[in-house]
Structure formats: structure tokens, C-alpha cells
Amino acid sequence: MENLKIFFEEAVQLLKELIEIPSFSKEENLTADLIEKNLIKKGVEVNREGNNVWAFAKEFNPFLPTVWLNSHHDTVKPNAGYTKNPHQAIVEDGKLFGLGSNDAGGPLVGLLATFCYFIQQELPFNLLFIASAEEEISGPNGISSIISKLPEAELAIVGEPTLMKLAVAEKGLLVIDAKIHGKAGHAAREEGVNAIYLALEDLDEIRNFQFMKSSPFLGRTKVTATVIKAGQQHNVVPDLCEYTLDVRVTDAYTLQEAFEELKANLKAELTPRSMRLQSSHLPAGHLMNQVATRLELEKYGSPTLSDQALIPWPSVKIGPGDSARSHTADEFIFLEEIQKGIEGYISIINKYAELS
């Protein structure tokens, strides 16, 4: 591919600079500055709100569909297992070490390189690059805060480390607070109705619970009890037991559908904390399925959350790096993975344009 070496070298240099700037969720202003300056150098008009940065490859044409290229530039905080400086970009044995190098620095700079590659080319769609904030915490000032300011996506390509496999479905997350009421009484006189015992019936149901619908890529939705609290003192039968459910919802359900199915089978009063982090899947008739077939991309369902959960349009998740390295000590990405990632992204855009 023409001038690909230049795009690769620029991507690696940018990633090194990003690694050396701390960009924890809600504190990404300096990496946003760097990405913004990098785009301005490419001669495109840059938009920014908070720490979200976006740009169109050419002037937006409202008569054309839009393809999003999105990845995030925030990171988690380094864990105690690091033996290298997490904010120092170190290259050893073909690996680039540093916090955020793999999740999602490699995909981010790969998508940006792809975006820059197509700046001078005519495409049958608008190409939009988005570097989003607060992805690691699904924060309110991340991509969800700018969705209304962006054109609808015919397709959103979300950059995350997937070994360049194509995630066509992703699990959503539903956290539920449950309360079950009994009746207080003195433990010595066997009075009252013990809320703990009532909750045990629910918890036994949860332990063996199977949702009715299954996903071809992600299997069955999974519910897990993760927190429980009841009682104040040893001699009082508790009248309230509270527990928390973690529900990983496949694309076979909306969060509301999964919630209603649980509610019908449990005695507790259930309250969802949020309905934001929806499951997603690529519609069967979407053009990206043809692209995947032509390029022989391996499809799979992803159990991990990304900005896909907050994007209301058809989306896929793909990128260089390995999800298994995310949030681990001495995080790294192979330089070769970045190069192949750029090649892969460019091939996807070219094939999507060809088939459009």
C-alpha cells in the first residue's frame, strides 16, 4: 500500500508520545491536546468537546452515509505488578511497552493512520474519526456526551485489541440492586420472618438460572450474585436483605428484556442501576458482513465492554493487540501488530467503499 511505511512510523511515534502522557479516565486533557494537534497538522477541521476529539476526512456531505472510526485515549491506572515505568515508552524485542499501549493505544493510532490515509481520497461515504474519553469507566463525559452532535453511523468501527478478529456482537452490562423484605423479631423467641432465608430462595434460583434465549455468538446471558448485606445485630431477625446482581447480557436481549425475565422469576424488589450499557450486534443483512466474508475476517462475540455499548448504530469491534494483555502489568503491543492493524483497517475501508 502506498506510503504505508510513513503512516506506520507516524502511528508508532504518536503512540510513544501518548504513553508518556498520563491519561487516566477523566484526566485525558493532555492526550486530547496531542491528538487534536496531530489532526490539525493533517489539515482537517478538528472538533472537540471536553476530552473527546473528532474530525471528518473531508467536508461533511449530508447526502452520503457516514462511517465512524472510534477508539479511546483514556487508560486505567497501573497496577502494583509493573516492573517497568508505565509512562515510559520502551521498545524491546519488537514490543512497545507502556500503559495504554495495547488498550487501546495501538487501535487508536491505527485508526488515526487509516483516517489520514484516506484524507486525499474520494469515498462513497463520510469518514469520521473519533478519539473518545472515559471509555474505561463508561463515563458520562465520554462518547455518549457527543453522540447527538455526530451524524448517524451507517457503520461504526470501534478500535479495541482483538487480534484483528471481528467482534460482531458484544455483551452489555446490567447491574441490579435487589431488596427482599421480611419481618423483624427476637432471634431467641423464633419471631419474625427472616429476610436472609427469603433471599436464599432467590439466590438458589439465581445460581441455577438460565435465560430462555441464546445468542449464536455469545451463548446465554449470565447472571451472578456478587454482593449481599443483611442484619444489624446477632439477636434480631433481619427484616431486610439486600443483594446485587451482575448481569452480562448478550445480543439476544435488550437490557430491559433481560431485566423483565429476571423480575418474573425472583421474589425481591429489583432496581436497575442503569440501562446505558446495551448489548450490540451487527444486523445480519449489513454490508459489513459481506466485507468480512470477502476479507476472510474471523467473526466472534466479545464478552468485554467497549464504547460499542453506548453507540446506537450498527458497529463492529476490531483492532491490533490482544484483549488478554489489557489492564495487565507491563502492558505491551507488538510493533508488527500495529503495522498489520493499519493494513487491516485500510483493507476494510477499501472493501467497504468497493461494495457500497
Image (cartoon, rainbow, N blue to C red):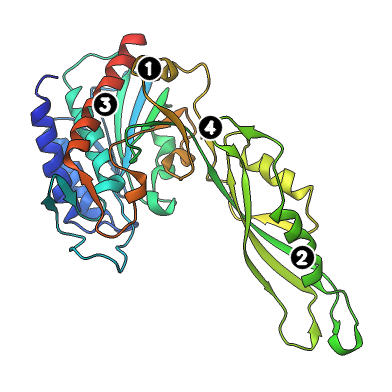
Chain-order first, disc 1 or disc 2:
2
Residue drawn at 71 percent across, 83 percent down: 232
Q: Residue furthest toward the front?
A: 93
Q: What residue type is labelled 1?
A: Val
* Pick the front one: 147 or 226: 226
* Above or below, comparing residue 160 to residue 150 in the picture: below
* Pick the front one: 302 or 135: 302
Q: In this view, does 147 lie to the left or right of 207?
A: left
Q: Are marks 1 and 3 in contact (CB under 8 Å)?
A: no
Residue drawn at 31 percent across, 54 percent down: 75
Q: Measure the C-alpha gap from mark 1 to mark 2.
A: 50 Å
The residue indicated by pointer 2 is: 200
Q: Measure the C-alpha gap from mark 1 to mark 3.
A: 12 Å
Q: Do the residues labelled 4 and 2 touch (CB within 8 Å)?
A: no
Chain-order first, disc 1 or disc 3:
1
The residue indicated by pointer 1 is: 291
Q: In which quarter of the image is residue 111?
A: top left
Q: Which labelled disc corresponds to residue 217? A: 4
Q: Which amino acid does label 2 sit on?
A: Leu
* Above or below, comparing residue 288 to residue 309 in the picture: above
Q: Measure the C-alpha gap from mark 4 to mark 2.
A: 32 Å
Chain-order first, disc 4 or disc 2:
2
Give the structural element (helix, strand or loop) at label 3. Answer: helix
Q: Which labelled disc corresponds to residue 344? A: 3
Nearer mark to the viewer, of 4 and 1: 4
Neighbour tally class for label 3: few under 14, some 14-19, many 20 plus, Cα within 10 Å: many
* Above or below, comparing residue 91 to residue 243 in the picture: above
Residue drawn at 30 percent across, 69 percent down: 80
Q: In which quarter of the image is residue 4?
A: top left
